[in-house]
Image (cartoon, rainbow, N blue to C red):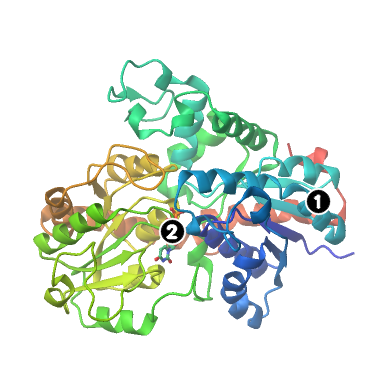
Amino acid sequence: MDTQPHIFFFPFMGHGHMIPTIEMAKLFASRGCRATIISTPANASNIIKSIERSRQLGLDIGVVLIKFPTKEVGLPEGCENTNSLTTKEMMDKFLVATTMLDQPLEELLFEHRPTCLVADVFFPWANQIAAKFGIPRFVFNGTSFFALCAYASLLQEEPQKKVSSDLEPFAIPNLPDEIFTTRQQLPDHMKEESELSAFARKVEESELTSSGIIVNSYYELEPAYADHYRNFLGMKAWHIGPTFLCSKDKAPRGKDSIDEHECLKWLDSKKPNSVVYVCFGSVANFDDAQLMEIAMGLEACGKEFIWVVKKEKREEGREEEWLPEGYEKRMEGKGLIIRGWAPQMLILQHEAVGGFVSHCGWNSTLEGISAGLPMVTWPVSAEQFYNEKLITQLLGIGFDVGNQRWSMFMGDCVKREAIAKAVSRIMEGEEAEEMRSRAKALRVLACEAVEEGGSSYTDLSALIEELKLHSTGSVSNKDSLP
Ligand code: UDP
């Protein structure tokens, strides 16, 4: 009998979800599973490029497509990725469109009959669909154990509803450490009832009733929270990360980036730890005034930098409105501005890079840690404020730039002085060196976790063994998985 588990991976259509899911699919395939990624036409070419090399290396990994209902919800044609959303209204329509993917998913499962479904945390309805076919549904929640614990605590205990102002700090209940937050660091749906609050509850419930959660983290990074999540909150979880460290395939991730070689050549000419890399992920979108402050802050601190800006290049000879006059000429050789998409992993791993200014998306955070870099934390939305606390308060490998307000695309405007000061603090001096050496130790632990016998390697083996029982039919889902 064929015992090779066939796993369907269904990521939410945003690069922060798709990139780690693709890495995860490669990882399972490299351990003998058959992996199929579900996506939509406008996302297909990026996925196909990212798995091409792995397929050539003989991994059993493919893609199946379903239609994304842009027209039905009033989004422009081809708007199938959070990367192309610029307003909250678009984001709301996008979320509605994703709830309409249940029927196509059901048809796919009927046709292919995989062993199990690993579906994104944002698809809470996937539990029922998997159940129709008698297969386990695992949740991929692409964040840290720390964020999972903090979020669960706030959702259950709701201390944010008991404080008198948005600025009053309060402790997040029941955590292994005393960690404070404020209402202004939380999204609206956690403060007052809305459609999104109902959705958040569905998500939480689907996590509890799923077959378990797959976490892209490693035990040694946050042991107290990995234990708390399982033992105190009672969740069944497997940590298998950092998934990207396992891959031998260095294919482009996310989208087509600027010329990698140009970028690496530029870095090759720099001294070790001399360049700060500044990037805010795939969703955050700063306005011109904020970009201007970043430009001035980077110039003022005097460090060499690579700065990724989500803007198209202007025609030759025209100055950018978000840059001080003559800025790029002045910065020639000193600062590299990448417009669009950067080869982030390659940049972070380069020895010339000595610090990372990040929005604290979990992928970026884990990539920064795995590169052994101190960070300036600049959270904007999602669960980024929790990740900031992990970096600055628990791991001691970063300083916050000072944004205090959760917002879909950008918080309060952070001034140039604060930016320059925070960058200097992670790039030079005794404190910076201490943080760098702590970050480097975490990098070593990350590499060990994914090696044979390491904690992530072993957790993945346990999960695959469990799946094999399902592909032979020796257990029913109810027998072995909650
Ligand atoms: N990324 C990249 N180039 C860019 C911007 C982002 O390769 O110019 C990648 C980054 O390496 C990470 C992902 O996109 O893997 C962003 O995920 P994250 O969780 O950090 O943030 P999000 O985009 O979800 O806010």
**Image: 15 above or below 209:** below
- Which secondary structure, mark 1? helix
Give the image quarter of residue 188.
top left
**Relative side of 376 to 215, left or right:** left
Q: Is ligand 1 closer than 8 angstroms to the Cβ of mark 2?
A: yes
Q: Residue at x 10, y 65 (%)?
A: 302
- Residue that label 1 marks: 106
- Residue 132 in the image: state x and y as whole percent: 85, 43
Choose between 181 and 73: the one closer to the eye: 73
| Neighbours of disc 2 within 10 Å: few (<14), some (14-19), many (20+) | some
**Image: 214 above or below 452:** above
What is the total number of numbered labels drawn onto the structure image? 2
Could you say which disc has been placed on residue 282 in the image?
Answer: 2
**Relative side of 297 to 254, left or right:** left
Q: Earlier in the sequence, mark 1 or mark 2?
A: 1
Task: Please say whether residue 179 is visible from this viewpoint.
Answer: no
- Residue 57 in the image: state x and y as whole percent: 63, 81
Give the image quarter of residue 328.
bottom left
